């Protein structure tokens, strides 16, 4: 049995009351089989970090600015996240790539900023449904990874967790088929190995739930899960973080 990384991305959901209720459930459990990280919306980050200070559960952010400081209304720097107790940060989620026009180059810059303050980046990559239908999955994955290898040294890249999230599986209620996940993870692992980055944690994301977690975590090269909707339920998140694999 190996330790996996389970990351709950709460996206733009919750209130002080609902966050407090999930935190109470997580704290009551005290420990989980796998490493657990929760990524709340910005306003609840400091509150979560304070509540989880003495617990093994870590806190992450859902995005970070590509620069350190300055006149950038609404932006939050990696330094500010670290200063507020964050240890992880999600970068390049498809929802940000699409709605905020984030480029691969911008995402690489965000990773550099995060690594400079010891925040562990979790970068999301994955193809859309039309791209999958056109047989472009590998092309898209290699293009997204290619920008990272241009910008990061093998040592830097080895500190980045890569989440394969096929865009069409996110929020669909149906995870990608096992063979698709296996193929994508194998391609990602080979690409990283060829670059000299050998120790990356690879995650799968897209409609993960307590029922499918065991099967997903048993797929070769899958070292963890990025969980959206199901992570808003403390009991479900703990169940996933305690999956026997
Ligand atoms: O960041 C999480 C992913 O977008 C997956 O979301 P989901 O579990 O609601 O499909």
Image (tube, rainbow, N blue to C red):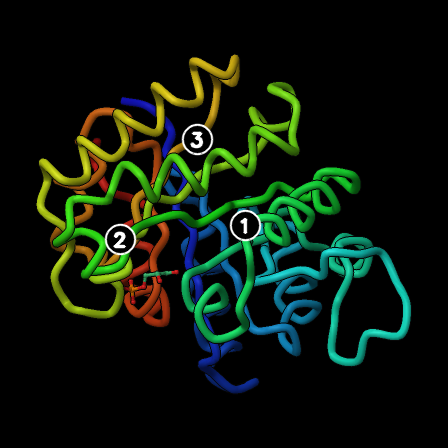
Q: Give the x, y percent position of residue 131.
A: 23, 54
Q: Which residue is mark 1?
A: 104
Q: Label 3 vs label 1: CA separation? A: 20 Å
Mark 1 falls on what kind of element?
helix
Mark 2 falls on what kind of element?
loop
**Which comes sooner in the sequence, label 2 or label 1?**
1
Mark 3 falls on what kind of element?
loop
Q: Which residue is mark 2?
A: 166
User: In screen coordinates, is 47 left or right of 25?
Assistant: right
Q: Label 2 vs label 1: CA separation? A: 16 Å
Q: Give the x, y percent position of residue 5.
A: 41, 39
Identify which residue, 114 or 223, lies in the foreground: 114
**In which of the image's four quarters is ligand 1 placed?**
bottom left
Identify which residue, 20 or 63, lies in the foreground: 63
Q: Give the x, y percent position of residue 118.
A: 73, 38
Q: Label 2 vs label 3: CA separation? A: 17 Å
The residue lying at 75 percent from left, 54 percent from top is 78
**Label 3 near label 2: C-beta < 8 Å?**
no
**Which comes sooner in the sequence, label 3 or label 1?**
1
Q: Which residue is mark 3?
A: 201
> Within the image, what quadrant is residue 65 found in?
bottom right
Dot 1 crowding, Cα within 10 Å, few <14, some 14–19, many 20+: some
- Tell which tag, 3 or 1, sits nearer the viewer: 1
The residue lying at 41 percent from left, 62 percent from top is 94
Dot 2 crowding, Cα within 10 Å, few <14, some 14–19, many 20+: many
User: In screen coordinates, is 16 left or right of 233?
Assistant: right
């Amino acid at each position: 049995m190996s330790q996996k990384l389970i990351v709950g991305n709460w996206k733009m959901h919750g209130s002080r009351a609902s966050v407090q209720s999930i935190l109470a459930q997580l704290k009551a459990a005290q420990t989980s089989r796998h490493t657990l990280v929760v990524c709340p919306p910005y306003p609840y980050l400091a509150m979560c970090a304070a509540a989880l200070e003495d617990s093994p559960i870590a806190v992450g952010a859902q995005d970070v600015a590509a620069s350190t400081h300055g006149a950038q209304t609404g932006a939050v720097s990696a330094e500010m996240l670290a200063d507020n107790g964050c240890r992880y940060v999600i970068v390049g989620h498809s929802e940000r790539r699409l709605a905020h026009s984030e480029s691969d180059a911008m995402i690489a810059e965000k990773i550099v900023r995060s690594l400079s303050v010891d925040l562990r980046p979790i970068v999301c990559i994955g193809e859309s449904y039309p791209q999958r239908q056109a047989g472009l999955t590998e092309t898209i994955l290699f293009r997204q990874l290619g920008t990272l290898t241009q910008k990061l040294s093998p040592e830097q890249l080895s500190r980045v967790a890569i989440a394969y999230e096929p865009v069409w599986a996110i929020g669909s209620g149906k995870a990608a088929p096992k063979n698709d996940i296996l193929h994508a993870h194998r391609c990602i692992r080979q690409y990283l190995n060829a670059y000299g980055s050998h120790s990356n944690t690879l995650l799968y994301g897209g409609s993960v739930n307590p029922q499918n977690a065991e099967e997903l975590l048993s797929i070769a090269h899958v070292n963890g899960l990025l969980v959206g909707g199901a992570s808003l339920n403390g009991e479900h998140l703990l169940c996933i973080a305690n999956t026997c694999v």
